Image (cartoon, helix red, strand yellow):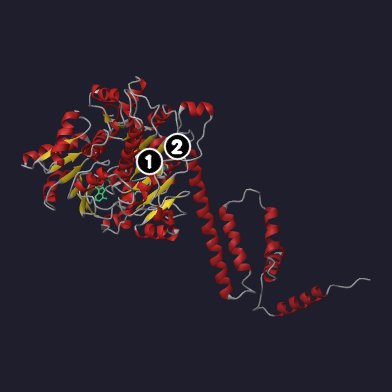
């Protein structure tokens, strides 16, 4: 039995009707197209797509997908309301955005994976025997009993009030007074003499953490008081050791502090000496400390080591030298602190640090401190730490909020003359930073000619002159210190009113370190930075975002700078670049990483700080 399909009949009828009227002439539509239209009407776009995809090759690109998306949406318009279509379109756009974000994050993860440190920081014997420590070192210190009995919510409240971010397991409670930290009267007197009354946020959480024997990563802006976090507990530990069993000849050090520059090492050493002086005043056993840096005769260090040394403050170069020559051993060293750890890795001391680690032969408490701590360094650090507590006071990399940051466009040739005008902004002391040694010398000469009481330091000057200049500036005998970045890392000059950046450093982290020389200990400070066309756009973008974050005025010429990838700046839990910490770009566009990968940074020797690493340290 054969029956004609009714549809066919109907269509013929329609066609007949149409052909009657010339006005309604419809051109011929190919069968394929008619089928597509019909499927669209029925909302069976899936089937349509299947058919299409069968015809397409397997290597479809993004733009093809886009076309399909469009078809999908338009195909449905016959049976979906406008509002629904709009929602659908929005969803599609969102989905596309998410996948772009995912793609970017994945790419970043892959890059980080490549640059992250794989080799662990361990002693040779530990490596050879495969020893891995899983529990932190135990100390005799405990927080006051009443604090231990307080609910955890109280600790969280204090951290919240003081903007302390913590990460890690079983974090010791924050303590709001030095008394609660159970310091000896001698230490409390030493603090009083420095007019230090109550702990700063990094000290509130950091000191109990260190006293408890925990490994720690301390991220705090410059001038936050981080030095005391590693110095005071160490003095107490040494005192306890000496009390139990006095150090014999050639024994020690028990504690080792490594700094990236001689000046910072000397400053830390002086702080230790200050407190040790108070121990002696209280008739307590002597705690001996030794400064091991280039420019200081090794014989001075040997004298102290021979008596038995408790604390050694060193720069990597000199320390390596002394370890290799067996002048000093780390057999009994149980406390290691790396100050400005990110600088150390940045300056290429990574291998030295690794070698230094290999001289340890027992578990030690390891502390890493820095004002900036990009993820790459945190990863590097984690391999050396046991159940670390990360304490972050103020976002890592952020400039101190106490500094007013002014950025001015000054042409290259006008800079030196404009300096004089700029110096009028505040009373002394003023710090002027320049990237190149020649510029430091030129500025110094110019200021002397103009009758300004100025001194200068850079890596090309001998250690004696450097120390003399730093001391004269510190004691306020001189009004202005002109320096390269050797003076920007962790150095503490009291009451610096104004930091002038004669040029913008290539690296925004250096900018953060430089301006951190003012606005210290809760005082306000001013930073003026000269920029012009010669600056790299990437660093200017980082600067722009840093100013925005610190709620500072962004000059128009910076505000107008935009990067292609600005939309990605605040992706995931990472702000800006996970490699260098710059806020104006992502790791995918990191100029520092690019430079490193091209192996240019270490060879150029253009920047004074890098150029002098060998001679300096
Ligand atoms: P630092 O960040 O360790 O370089 O310290 C910066 C300056 O802050 C130094 O001059 C310290 O003497 C001072 N300082 C450290 N702790 C405190 C505190 N709790 N109260 C006031 N000033 C402090």
Q: In front: 459, or 57? A: 459
Q: Counting other residues with Cα less than 10 Å from the Cα at mark 2, is it few (<14), some (14-19), or many (20 or more)?
A: many
Q: In front: 579, or 242? A: 242
Residue lying furthest top in this view? 325
Q: Quadrant of residue 370?
A: top left
Q: Counting other residues with Cα less than 10 Å from the Cα at mark 1, is it few (<14), some (14-19), or many (20 or more)?
A: many
Counting every numbered tag in the picture gives 2
Residue 302, above or below 312: above
Answer yes or no: do the residues labelled 1 and 2 have beta carbons within 8 Å?
Answer: yes
- Residue depicted at x 56% and y 63%: 92
- Quadrant location of the C terminus in the rendered image: top left
- Residue depicted at x 6% and y 39%: 449
The percent position of residue 334, horizontal first and vertical second, equals: 40, 33
Residue 601 visible here: no
Residue topped by disc 2: 384
**Residue 71 horizontal side relative to residue 367, left or right:** right
- In space, the residues marked 1 and 2 are separated at their CA atoms by 10 Å
Residue topped by disc 1: 368
Q: Earlier in the sequence, mark 1 or mark 2?
A: 1
- Residue depicted at x 37% and y 35%: 336
The numbered disc on residue 97 is none
Q: In front: 24, or 335? A: 335
Q: Quadrant of residue 36?
A: bottom right
Q: Secondary structure at mark 1?
A: strand
Q: In front: 561, or 425? A: 425
Residue 616 visible here: yes
The percent position of residue 168, horizontal first and vertical second, equals: 46, 49
Residue 530, above or below 161: above
**Residue 240 horizontal side relative to residue 466, left or right:** right
Q: Secondary structure at mark 2?
A: loop
The percent position of residue 180, horizontal first and vertical second, equals: 33, 51
């Amino acid at each position: 039995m054969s029956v004609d399909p009714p549809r066919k009949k109907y269509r013929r009828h329609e066609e007949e009707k149409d052909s009657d009227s010339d006005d309604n002439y419809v051109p011929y539509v190919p069968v394929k197209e008619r089928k597509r239209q019909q499927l669209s009407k029925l909302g069976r776009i899936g089937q349509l797509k299947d058919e299409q995809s069968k015809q397409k090759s397997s290597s479809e690109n993004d733009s093809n997908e886009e076309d399909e998306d469009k078809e999908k949406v338009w195909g449905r318009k016959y049976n979906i309301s406008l509002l629904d279509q709009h929602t659908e379109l929005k969803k599609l756009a969102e989905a596309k955005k998410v996948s772009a974000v995912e793609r970017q994050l994945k790419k970043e993860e892959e890059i980080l994976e490549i640059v992250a440190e794989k080799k662990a920081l361990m002693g040779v014997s530990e490596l050879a025997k495969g020893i891995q420590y899983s529990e932190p070192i135990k100390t005799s210190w405990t927080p006051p009993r009443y604090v231990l009995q307080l609910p955890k919510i109280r600790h969280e409240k204090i951290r919240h009030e003081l903007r302390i971010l913590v990460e890690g397991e079983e974090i010791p409670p924050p303590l709001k007074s030095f008394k609660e930290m159970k310091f000896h009267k001698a230490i409390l007197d030493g603090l009083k003499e420095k007019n230090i009354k109550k702990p700063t946020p990094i000290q509130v959480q950091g000191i109990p953490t260190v006293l408890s024997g925990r490994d720690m990563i301390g991220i705090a802006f410059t001038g936050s008081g981080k030095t005391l976090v590693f110095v005071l507990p160490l003095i107490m530990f040494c005192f306890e050791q000496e009390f139990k069993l006095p150090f014999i000849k050639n024994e020690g050090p028990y504690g080792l502090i490594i700094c990236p520059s001689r000046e910072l090492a000397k400053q830390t050493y002086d702080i230790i000496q200050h407190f040790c002086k108070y121990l002696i005043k209280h008739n307590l056993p002597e705690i001996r400390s030794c400064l091991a840096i280039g420019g200081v005769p090794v014989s001075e260090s040997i004298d102290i080591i021979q008596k038995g040394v408790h604390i050694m403050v060193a720069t990597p170069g000199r320390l390596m030298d002394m370890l290799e020559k067996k002048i000093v051993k780390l057999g009994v060293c149980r406390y290691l602190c790396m100050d400005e750890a990110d600088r150390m890795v940045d300056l290429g001391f990574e291998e030295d640090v690794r070698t230094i680690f290999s001289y340890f032969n027992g578990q030690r408490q390891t502390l890493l401190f820095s004002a900036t701590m990009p993820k790459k360094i945190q990863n590097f650090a984690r391999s050396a730490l046991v159940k670390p507590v990360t304490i972050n006071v103020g976002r890592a990399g952020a400039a101190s909020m106490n500094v007013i940051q002014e950025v001015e466009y000054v042409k290259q040739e006008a800079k030196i003359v404009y300096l004089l005008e700029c110096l009028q902004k505040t009373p002394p002391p003023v710090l002027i930073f320049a990237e190149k040694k020649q510029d430091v010398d030129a500025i110094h000469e110019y200021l002397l000619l103009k009758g300004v009481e100025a001194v200068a330091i850079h890596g090309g000057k001998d250690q004696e002159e450097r120390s003399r200049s730093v001391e004269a500036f510190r004691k306020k005998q001189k009004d202005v210190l002109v320096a390269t970045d050797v003076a920007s890392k962790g150095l503490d000059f009291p009451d610096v009113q104004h930091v002038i950046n004669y040029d913008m450093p290539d690296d925004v982290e250096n900018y953060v370190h430089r301006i951190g020389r003012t606005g210290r200990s809760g005082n306000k400070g001013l930073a003026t930075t000269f920029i012009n066309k010669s600056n790299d756009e990437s660093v200017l973008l980082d600067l722009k975002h840093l100013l925005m974050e610190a709620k500072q005025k962004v000059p128009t010429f910076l505000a107008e700078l935009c990067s292609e990838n600005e939309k990605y700046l605040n992706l995931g839990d990472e702000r800006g670049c996970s490699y260098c910490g710059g806020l104006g770009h992502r790791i995918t566009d990191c100029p520092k990483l690019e430079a490193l990968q091209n192996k240019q940074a270490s060879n150029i020797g253009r920047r004074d700080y890098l150029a002098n690493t060998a001679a300096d340290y």
